[in-house]
């Protein structure tokens, strides 16, 4: 009995083997909004084997992390930056447990943050430092520029923070630009100089605005200083719209159009100096649609090509339909840029076609009339006469 007992224990231990696991793939990189899946495979181990997915440090899976019915496949749907990191597949049975890890990388466009956020007011003779920090993957490249200028400014970078030093003579609006392969992001900060010998300091009610074509726009400018500064308005590289009035520093634009988009400058002046403040205005307009051609005559078997064009704020979507019919003819093809094509037109395809162009402001439609030539056989000494058959 003493000789048989160790042998019996050895057999039991060999039968109860701990699981062996592997994962595929071991790492994945996806864009924000895409999905990633990982498979956990148990190659050996005494059943039953329990498979479980968890995040590193034994954290629970995110709410968009789903595990398949058998527990082997982990899917991260609609990936977010917070989903980036390590995930572990753990397999266990009565003999032990084993784990294997995968790494998920999520690429996303930059997000920018300024410290301090501004607007900044500095005493004359002082300087200020503005730090720009951006998150994003791949790591974004940061740069500074001054609004209204194409020159890139000299900055310092420490601990992934890009800092801009601004002196009193550098009053204006500054833009931190962050860019990676997934997109770009910008954030603005205004710097205003205060104090001194009563020099003016100008500020505007809004540094940027988006308005709808045909609306009335009001821009307000205020300025401190002694004596009281004179306030004037101008437009960068263009005269002010002819439908404008200025009263007490308030610029009013009536019935604005797309051509009125641009940068508007408030200038405050007194005996001790001047100061400028800027408002960037963009005018959005509804589409105006046209069809090229708007009338066409074809013979059966010819190809039909219609192009819908639209002026207005982008993006613009195009939709083709057939007036008085529930759908376009069989074999019709449309494209995102407004084309309608029928490779081999038939007599029954004659009619009026309508294109509707739509953007976030409104919509517009254009009509195209399609006529098909036909042949009428008339017995005049064997001659054949051709005539138009219109829908």
Image (cartoon, rainbow, N blue to C red):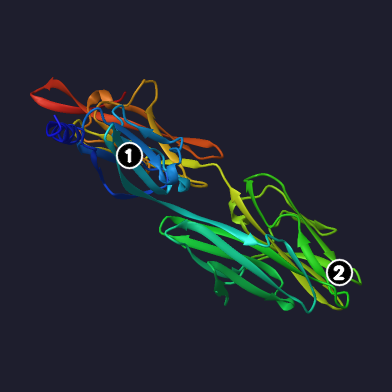
The residue under label 1 is: 90
Q: Residue at x 27, y 39 (%)?
A: 39
Quarter of the rendering occupied by the N terminus: top left
Q: Is residue 183 above or below residue 322?
A: below
Q: Nearer the viewer, residue 33 or 76?
A: 76
- Residue 304: where, in percent of width, then height? 27, 37
Q: Residue at x 80, y 68 (%)?
A: 201
Q: Is residue 217 left or right of residue 305?
A: right
Mark 1 vs 2, N-terminal side = 1
Quarter of the rendering occupied by the C terminus: top left
Q: Which mark is residue 229?
A: 2
Gap in Å between the C-alphas at discs 1 and 2? Answer: 73 Å
Residue 372 seen in the figure = yes
Residue 334 seen in the figure = no
Q: Is residue 57 above or below residue 49?
A: below
- Residue 107: where, in percent of width, then height? 41, 52
Dot 2: few (<14), some (14–19), or many (≥20) neighbours within 10 Å? many
- Residue 61: where, in percent of width, then height? 43, 38
Q: Quadrant of residue 126?
A: bottom right
Q: Is residue 221 left or right of residue 62?
A: right
Q: Residue at x 59, y 52 (%)?
A: 258
Secondary structure category for the residue under label 2 = loop
- Residue 208: where, in percent of width, then height? 66, 55
Q: Residue furthest front?
A: 2
Dot 1: few (<14), some (14–19), or many (≥20) neighbours within 10 Å? many
Q: Quadrant of residue 227?
A: bottom right
Secondary structure category for the residue under label 1 = strand
């Amino acid at each position: 009995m003493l000789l048989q007992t160790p042998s019996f224990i050895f057999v039991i231990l060999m039968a109860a083997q701990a699981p062996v696991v592997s994962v595929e793939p071991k790492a994945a990189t996806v864009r924000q909004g895409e999905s990633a899946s990982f498979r956990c495979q148990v190659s050996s181990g005494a059943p039953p084997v329990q498979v479980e997915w968890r995040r590193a440090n034994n954290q629970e899976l995110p709410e968009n992390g789903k595990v398949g019915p058998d527990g082997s496949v982990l899917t991260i749907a609609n990936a977010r930056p917070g989903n980036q990191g390590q995930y572990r597949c753990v397999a266990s049975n009565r003999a032990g447990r084993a784990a294997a890890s995968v790494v998920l990388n999520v690429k996303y466009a930059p997000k920018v943050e300024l410290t301090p956020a501004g607007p900044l007011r500095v005493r004359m003779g002082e300087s200020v430092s503005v730090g720009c920090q951006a998150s994003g993957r791949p790591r974004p490249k940061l740069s500074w520029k001054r609004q209204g200028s194409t020159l890139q400014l000299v900055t310092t970078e420490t601990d992934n923070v890009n800092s801009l030093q601004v002196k009193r003579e550098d009053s204006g609006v500054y833009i931190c630009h962050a860019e990676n392969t997934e997109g770009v992001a910008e954030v603005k900060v205004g710097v205003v100089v205060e104090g001194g010998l009563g020099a003016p300091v100008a500020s505007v009610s809004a540094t940027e605005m988006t308005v709808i074509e045909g609306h009335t726009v009001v821009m307000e400018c205020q300025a401190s200083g002694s004596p009281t500064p004179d306030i004037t308005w101008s437009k960068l590289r263009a005269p002010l719209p002819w439908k404008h009035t200025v009263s007490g520093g308030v610029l009013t634009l009536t019935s604005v159009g797309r051509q009125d988009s641009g940068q508007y400058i408030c200038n405050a002046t007194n005996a001790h100096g001047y100061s400028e403040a800027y408002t960037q205005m963009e005018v959005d307009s509804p589409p105006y649609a046209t069809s090229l051609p708007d009338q066409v005559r074809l013979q059966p078997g010819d190809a039909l090509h219609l192009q819908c064009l639209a002026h207005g704020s982008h993006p613009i979507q195009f939709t083709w339909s057939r007036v008085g019919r529930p759908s376009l003819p069989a074999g019709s093809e449309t494209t995102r840029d407004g084309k309608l094509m029928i490779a081999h037109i038939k007599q029954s395809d004659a009619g009026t076609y309508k294109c509707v162009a739509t953007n976030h402001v409104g919509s517009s439609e254009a009509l195209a009339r399609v006529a098909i030539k036909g042949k009428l056989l008339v017995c005049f000494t064997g001659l054949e006469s051709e005539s138009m058959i219109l829908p």
